[in-house]
Image (cartoon, helix red, strand yellow):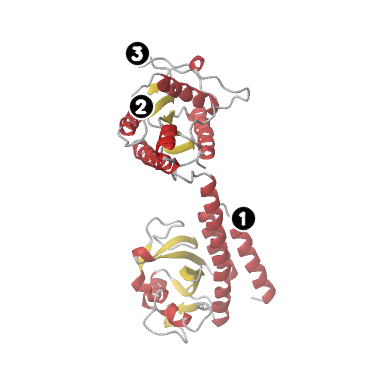
Amino acid sequence: MGEDRRLAAVVALAQGMAAAHGSREAWRAAASGACRALGGSFAALSVWERELGRLRVLVNVGELAEGEEEFPEDEAYPVHQFAEITEFLHEQWAGGGEPDAWVETAEGPAAGRQPGYCHQRVAALRRRGRGCCVVAPIVLHGRAWGELYVARPAGEAVFGRGDADFATVLASVVAAGIAQTERLEEVRRLAFTDSLTGLANRRAVDVRLEQAIERHRRDDAVVSLVVCDLNGLKRVNDTHGHAAGDRLLERFGSVLSLCGAMLPGALAARLGGDEFCLLAVGPPADQVVKAAGELCRRAAELELGDGVACGVASTEDPIGPVRSARRLFRLADAAQYRAKAERAGRPVVAGRAGPDDPVVRLADEPSRDTGGERRRFRGRHTP
């Protein structure tokens, strides 16, 4: 491959990873770009999971052999079977710089390779009908992160030293792409996470609730929302200090997460200040109300605070058509407001009537500002 073609391949690889949305797309772009650049028929990207002592395959692309999957769930290999990731690399690294790529063939060790490190790869090449491979270590933040692997079928030209050198360059581009993807995902995570409790934040709830209501309109999926107001936060802040108030918020966040686990796939979130919620899509309304009841019980047992006021609204209950996320939120909020006004020790459920279950309708909502927003959060807002 000429220098211009190789430069174009590097640019294409970098652009493919930059355009990826999320880790999986970035992994696929890395493996596919390297496979094309090196004229391979198959490529894989693997990560070294130090804590588990294994090399785990993230993605396979190209001509897959029997048993290989594009995104394997459990394709991993004990790292001692490929000792170069922990031994050979560090020996080569000792002199400075970064480790170079190397070539393996189905016939045995390639020229210049130290013996004893390649027998597993040679066996794998033969088993899968491949004639050779080039292995390029990926270094991230100064440490071995994993490897890029590109192979050719038996009978085709064997990779040469120039190919290995080019694979080293490609691995550096892949490392930069992975680092960028990780940074972007961290930014996205922080944008949708409450920094104090580690729960989802209001932005995440708004996005997920819109998606849930769309699914309800399309498939009639049950969507339920539990809105909670933690009682006594201002008193705790005034009496014990804001650090104690933060501990109460964190502790209640843990309780909310625990009760949310009773509802498969539920989103536990802090809306701001002393207000929290659970969003569930799929579980029956009664199951959601049960989880909310458990939340009330556990919150009442917290050392600080005065329990929680809890309101529930579910599309499975007789609350009328729910065509917008805003309507379900308003119903749940109105139920929560009723629970707080009545100092209820159990959830108040919109649309349910009975001796202990008053009907909650939009007419029961607290007043709102002219912009239609929810009432302002009470208590100290901790970002």
Marked residue nearer the N-terminal end (3 or 2): 2
Residue at image mark 2: 289
- Amino acid on which the number 2 mark rests in the picture: Val
Front residue of this view, candidates 115 and 22: 22
- Amino acid on which the number 1 mark rests in the picture: Ala
Residue 114 percent across, percent down from the top left? 41, 85
Marked residue nearer the N-terminal end (1 or 2): 1
Q: Are dots 1 and 2 in contact, CB under 8 Å?
A: no
Residue 111 percent across, percent down from the top left? 47, 86
Whether residue 282 sits left or right of residue 33 in the image: it is: left
| Residue depicted at 38% across the width and 73% down the height | 82
Mark 3 element type = loop
Distance between mark 1 and mark 2 Cα atoms: 43 Å
Residue 285 percent across, percent down from the top left? 38, 26
Which mark is on residue 354? 3
- Amino acid on which the number 3 mark rests in the picture: Gly
Q: Is residue 286 above or below residue 160?
A: above
